[in-house]
């Protein structure tokens, strides 16, 4: 990315350590440093994700299949928290953590290695850490999850939320009062949701979008909730409920519609080979949050989000495969995509660090197999 620069700008050096610097992007985004202490605040459950890759297909009853690789990493709310932090955003997370081995690993990884503020989080004695096993095959995945009931009521932070420029919520459940309060104080509310395992896709879920500024569902979710046949039709229907809707289409890119201005943008996905799509939707959302706070035009926000998601699927382990700015710079210099494609991402160059700083430790999957 750093060699294909805008006219009149000198090429920037490579970053040897992919995560050597995160600060410059965040500093550029925040300008003079004025404003709240956090860029984004979110709450939710953090899962221990175990990710099997290289499978020939889903396992059949009574049969055993061999996986080509295995990774483990923080999942759930950690997917987007890590992805945002690696882009230089200051992220606060409120979540329960079990007092078991998995809980200790997750807390240490997020707080010490990924730089996420866990001040509002809590360790819960006797509560088991939620675990998800993800099986990736043919650019798709299936999952199995174990999770005990939340130890605290949903949306209960045990106190007021920290000040932040934005917050991220799941609209699977009612939007918590703290998010509404943050919105009244000027914070942008970004919303997403998960797959409805009941298959009911209740329309009343969409009523919660009245409390959201930016909604980021994937295409299947968007079409199911709106009872439409195409992602474009789903975006049109959702734009009647929320100021800005973004429909994620995976390998087909994304569509965005700004209801306030009528602006519409559609951008193709980054042409890369997917190794593990786990968490890619969250990485896309993280990129879109960064680009929105940076004030980029709508089409550039989609491109940057697609870039982040595209780089993430080339690695095992979900959240820990999300890119840093050094990854973005190295990709631009790799020659993996034609210069005509890279030219569309010239707007990213000013955010890339001019020089490499002191290396920082990048959290790695606890287990890893060969691709």
Image (spheres, rainbow, N blue to C red):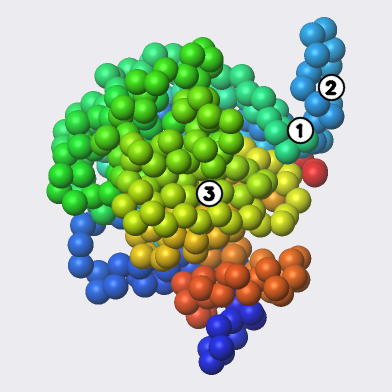
Kindly state the secondary structure of the residue where label 3 is placed.
strand
Dot 1 or dot 2, earlier in sequence: 2
Q: Tell me the distance, in whole angstroms, between the alpha carbons under discs 3 and 1.
A: 25 Å
Q: Residue at x 84, y 22 (%)?
A: 65
Res 165 seen here: yes
Label 1 SS: strand
Assess disc 2: are there few (<14), some (14-19) or many (≥20) residues with their C-alpha within 10 Å of its C-alpha. few
Q: Which residue is mark 2?
A: 65
Foreground: disc 3 or disc 2 = 3
Q: Give the residue pinned by disc 1.
A: 137
Front tag of 1 and 2: 1
Task: Give the answer, above or below, for where 199 lies relative to 276.
Answer: above
Distance in Å between CA atoms under marks 3 and 2? 37 Å
Tell which of 212 and 130 is nearer to you. 212
Residue 196 location in percent, x, y? 50, 20
At 30% from the left and 29% from the top, the residue drawn is: 208
Q: Is residue 140 left or right of residue 323?
A: right
233 on left or right of 253? left
**Rendered image quadrant of residue 181:** top left
CA separation in Å, label 1 and label 2: 12 Å
């Amino acid at each position: 990315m750093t060699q294909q620069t805008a006219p009149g700008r000198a090429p920037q050096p490579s970053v040897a350590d992919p995560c050597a610097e995160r600060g410059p992007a965040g500093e550029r985004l925040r300008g003079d440093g004025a404003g709240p202490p956090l860029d984004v605040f979110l709450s939710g459950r953090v899962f221990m994700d175990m990710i099997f890759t290289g499978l020939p297909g889903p396992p059949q009853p009574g049969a055993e299949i061999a996986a080509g690789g295995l990774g483990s990493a923080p999942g759930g709310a950690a997917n987007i928290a890590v992805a945002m932090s690696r882009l230089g955003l200051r992220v606060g997370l409120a979540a329960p953590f079990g007092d078991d081995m998995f809980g200790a690993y997750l807390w240490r990884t997020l707080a010490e290695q990924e730089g996420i503020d866990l001040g509002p989080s809590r360790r819960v004695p006797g509560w088991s850490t939620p675990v998800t096993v993800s099986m990736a095959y043919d650019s798709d995945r299936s999952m199995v999850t174990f999770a005990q009931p939340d130890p605290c009521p949903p949306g209960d932070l045990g106190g007021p939320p920290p000040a932040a420029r934005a917050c991220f919520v799941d609209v699977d459940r009612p939007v918590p009062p703290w998010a509404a309060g943050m919105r009244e104080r000027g914070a942008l509310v970004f919303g997403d949701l998960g797959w409805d395992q009941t298959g009911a896709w209740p329309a009343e879920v969409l009523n919660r979008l009245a409390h959201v500024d930016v909604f980021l569902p994937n295409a299947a979710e968007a079409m199911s909730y709106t009872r439409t046949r195409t992602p474009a039709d789903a975006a049109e229907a959702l734009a009647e409920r929320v100021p800005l809707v973004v429909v994620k289409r995976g390998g087909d890119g994304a569509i965005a519609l700004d209801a306030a201005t009528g602006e519409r943008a559609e951008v193709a996905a980054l042409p890369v080979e997917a190794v593990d799509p786990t968490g890619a939707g969250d990485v896309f959302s993280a990129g879109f949050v960064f680009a929105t706070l940076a004030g980029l035009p709508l089409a550039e926000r989609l491109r940057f989000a697609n870039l982040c998601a595209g780089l993430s699927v080339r690695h095992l382990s979900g959240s820990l495969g999300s890119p840093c700015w050094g990854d973005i710079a190295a990709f631009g210099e790799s020659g993996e995509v034609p210069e005509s494609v890279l030219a569309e991402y010239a707007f990213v160059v000013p955010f890339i660090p001019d020089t490499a700083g002191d290396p920082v430790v990048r959290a790695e999957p606890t287990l890893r197999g060969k691709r």
